[in-house]
Image (cartoon, helix red, strand yellow):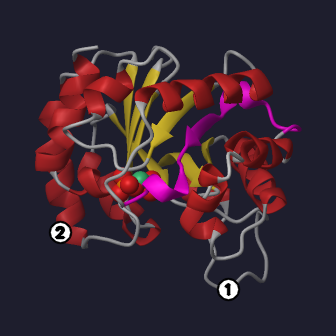
Amino acid sequence: MQTPTHWLIANWKMNGTAQGVREYINAIGPAVATLPEAAAFVYCPPAIYLPVADEALGANTRIALGAQDCHAKPSGAHTGEHSALMLKDSGCRYVIVGHSERRIAGETDEQVGAKAAAALEAGLTPVICVGETLAAYEAGDTNAVLNRQCAALSALDLTRCLIAYEPVWAIGTGKTPTPEEIAAVHRHLKTVLGSTVAVLYGGSVNAGNAREILALSEVSGALVGGAGLTLHGMEPIIAALRDL
Ligand code: PGA
């Protein structure tokens, strides 16, 4: 299989049912099949539904499965947690780490780095989220925040990771940075992390803005929350990627 140049990742967060997961996979399959080989589609349902999703996918290799988080340790007394190996065992190829909704709940930069390292060790591709809060954005501190978050990633082989730039203030709000701002931040991240690192954009990506955002040469795809919950919301974003 060709190494992708672009990724579209649907993060379902804490939404859906087993039946909804099956229906989504069946509904979105034909649209995903129209994507070129260089575009990967990653579906991240709640962890409990990964086996349901894996079974529903059957022989469909165009949709890859991802998890929304993993623990940094391979096993042990960590009630309620899932190791990266467990996720791999359940059919995952990707795992989101450091999502702002987890950072807000207390996850540190170091923990995010350790989770990404555990994902790589297990053979998963970590999707490492970084991004500034509204206060940091308004104070002009975006790059400083990103530099701090990226410093915890220095030991990782970033050629095997994906970075998702997700301004916290753009997540689920309908607000997005301008295309120029997105391009500038992605260029900054590539300066800090390496020019070949794939950087995706996330935060209120939808039918109305996907074409403009995905067309930016600095952007290697999108991490989609709300709009990715339904075929109706995701199909125009898939079409935008297909038509690049
Ligand atoms: P959103 O979420 O598309 O609903 O803004 C994106 C995310 O949290 O990854």
Q: Quadrant of the N terminus?
A: top left
Q: Position of residue 81 (x, y in %)?
A: 64, 75
Amino acid type, residue under disc 1 in the picture: Thr
> Dot 2, crowdedness within 10 Å: few (<14), some or many (≥20)?
few
Q: Is residue 230 left or right of residue 101?
A: left
Q: Residue 121: x and y, percent?
A: 76, 44
Ligand 1's quadrant is bottom left
Task: Indicate the amino acid at tag 2.
Answer: Gln
Seen in the image, is 140 located left or right of residue 62? right
Residue found at x 61% / y 82%:
80
For label 1, the residue is 79
Q: Look at the image and tell me in which quarter the C terminus lies.
A: top left
Task: Assign a secondary structure to mark 2.
Answer: helix
The Cα atoms of the two marked residues, 1 and 2, are separated by: 27 Å
Label 2, on which residue? 19
Looking at this view, is 149 or 4 the one in front?
149
What label sits on residue 218 in the rendered view? none
Q: How many marks?
A: 2
Q: For numbered disc 1, what is the local secondary structure?
A: loop
Image: magenta residue range: 154-172
